[in-house]
Amino acid sequence: MIHTNLRINKFNNREELFKAIANKTQHDLAEAVITKGGASFIVPGGTTPAPAFDLLSKAELEWEKITIAQSDERWLDASHAQSNERLTRENLLINNAKIAKYISMKNNANTTEQGELDCNKTYASIPNPFTICMLGMGLDGHIASLFPDSKNIDNALSLENKDLCIAIDATGCPVAGDYPKRMSLTLSAILHSETILLLITGKEKLSIIENLLEEQRQTEIPVSRILNQSSTTVEVFWCN
């Protein structure tokens, strides 16, 4: 299947990359506020998007009408250095964007399994379809916390699973690091977005994307499920 709504944007340097993805995000959020009265912005974890977040935080938007939430989260308190929520609060929910509505993915449950139901109820309050779902990608092709070799990955990637959030146990997956217990959006939730923005850097990751597109079919690699489909617009933003 060839993705009919996919575009790869390549930039000469990271300054251009972050400025472009911030501008695209600002434009789409502003348009949604005008046409729908509000917008929703799903954000990735990690440090890569921080410069784009900083630019966005200064944008002249009606932030009080915009809801922000994570695509995935380690099951850690928001004060923890590895918490995605902490990174978002420190890099995006500042300046003009500090008045945006933020929905936490992490709740008070002791485990992700125990917190899954409440997480789904909380995320059901986010304006849907999501205006923008921004994602990163690992060298194993994972998006959000949908790791290829994690337990229950088949359920997480099944479009028959209409849950928004799913508990992920990525124990044994090297790229999951020291905190393999995660909460993540399901594939069906990710695809129920008006636009997916995939932010990647480095030649290796670009090669992964281009090789998967050449295959023109969905594979067991999670990112292929958003590349080789025709229901949701996907834009890749890349520089070396």
Image (tube, grey):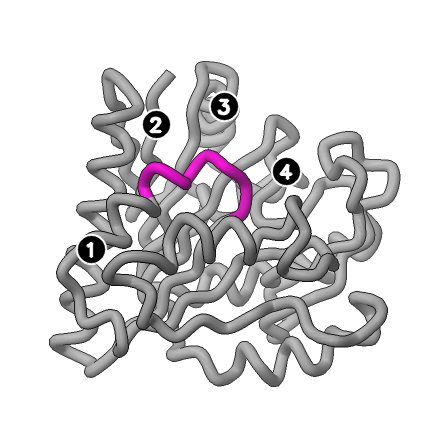
Give neighbour class at mark 2: few <14, some 14-19, many 20+ (Cα, 10 Å). many
The quarter of the picture where residue 222 lies is top right
Lower position in the chain sequence, tag 2 or tag 3: 3
Question: Which residue type does callout 1 highlight?
Answer: Gln
The residue carrying mark 3 is 205
Question: Which residue type does callout 2 highlight?
Answer: Trp
Q: How far apart are marks 4 and 2 (CA)?
A: 19 Å
Give neighbour class at mark 1: few <14, some 14-19, many 20+ (Cα, 10 Å). some
The residue carrying mark 4 is 221
The residue carrying mark 1 is 26
Instruction: Report helix, strand or loop for mark 4.
Output: loop
Question: Vertical placement of 144 versus 78: above or below?
Answer: above
Lower position in the chain sequence, tag 3 or tag 4: 3
Main SS, magenta residues: loop
Residue 102 lies in the magenta-colored region: no
Instruction: Report helix, strand or loop for mark 3.
Output: helix
Instruction: Report helix, strand or loop for mark 2.
Output: strand
The residue carrying mark 2 is 238
Q: How far apart are marks 3 and 4 (CA)?
A: 13 Å
Q: How far apart are marks 1 and 3 (CA)?
A: 25 Å
**Where in the figure is residue 64, as x and y percent of width and height?**
27, 77
Question: Which residue type does callout 4 highlight?
Answer: Ile
Instruction: Report helix, strand or loop for mark 1.
Output: helix
Lower position in the chain sequence, tag 4 or tag 1: 1
